[in-house]
Image: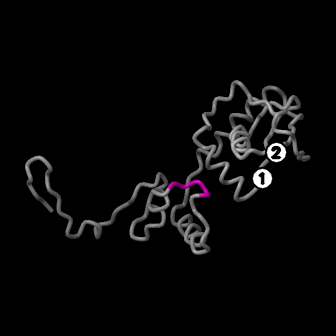
Amino acid sequence: MQIELINIDRLVPYDGNPRHNQASVDKVAASIKEFGWQQPIVTDSAMVIIAGHTRLLAARQLGLKEVPVYVADNLTAAQVKAYRIADNRLHEDAGWDNELLAIELDQIKDTGFDLELIGFNPQELEALLDKDHKTDSAGVKEFTAADFDNFAHQCPKCGFEWN
């Protein structure tokens, strides 16, 4: 696999890209700034992007003039279309082991590293690092019976209280 540094102006975003990636650009730019380029942009021989639209937008945001590119000239037109979708879709079925994730995050946090650079927002990090509550794969806290000891609630309309 040969990766080349290509002038950013030569790259052509795919007009039919079905992925909305604008919301991720800041995070990807921060990742590139912190970690450097660890994944090239993938194009066809005409420099039309197959995978890496968000990386291109992040590179432009960072003011980069050249980016690493892998030219995938061995794919059929159908494979290009399919890979473009697969690259964005396949990871969506994966989940997290939140206990192991919390251990990893704790270890990273202990070094003083800015955890927001890895893509989690502050609320997600707080939930994951909250040692008193476990979270499920969607980041929703799981409560135990002990969490409800001395739990009182008051109706906001009538003022009735119950435990």
Quarter-wise, where is residue 42 in the image? Answer: top right
- Tell me, for residue 66, which label it has, or none: none
Do residues under tags 1 and 2 come within 8 Å of each other at their CB atoms?
Answer: yes
Quarter-wise, where is residue 113 in the image? Answer: bottom right
Q: Which residue is mark 1?
A: 37
Q: Give the camera-side residue of 120 and 113.
A: 113
Residue 109: x percent and y percent? Answer: 57, 70
Secondary structure under tag 1 reads loop
- Tell me, for residue 67, which label it has, or none: 2
Dot 1 or dot 2, earlier in sequence: 1
Identity, as a three-letter code, of the amino acid under mark 1: Trp
Q: Residues within 10 Å of mark 1 (few under 14, many from 20)?
A: some
Q: Please indicate whether residue 120 sits to the left or right of residue 34 in the image.
A: left
Q: Residues within 10 Å of mark 2 (few under 14, many from 20)?
A: many
Instruction: Give the CA separation, mark 1 to mark 2.
Output: 8 Å
Residue 104: x percent and y percent? Answer: 59, 68
Residue 77: x percent and y percent? Answer: 81, 26
Majority SS type along the magenta span: loop
Residue 71: x percent and y percent? Answer: 87, 38
Identity, as a three-letter code, of the amino acid under mark 2: Val
Q: Residue at x 65, y 53 (%)?
A: 30
Secondary structure under tag 2 reads strand
Q: Please indicate whether residue 162 sits to the left or right of residue 25 in the image.
A: left
Q: Total marks drawn?
A: 2
Query: Range of the magenta residues?
Result: 117-121
Quadrant in which the C terminus is drawn: bottom left
Q: Give the camera-side residue of 161 and 67.
A: 67
Q: Residue at x 56, y 52 (%)?
A: 95
Colouring chosen for the image of the structure: one colour
Q: Residue at x 39, y 70 (%)?
A: 132
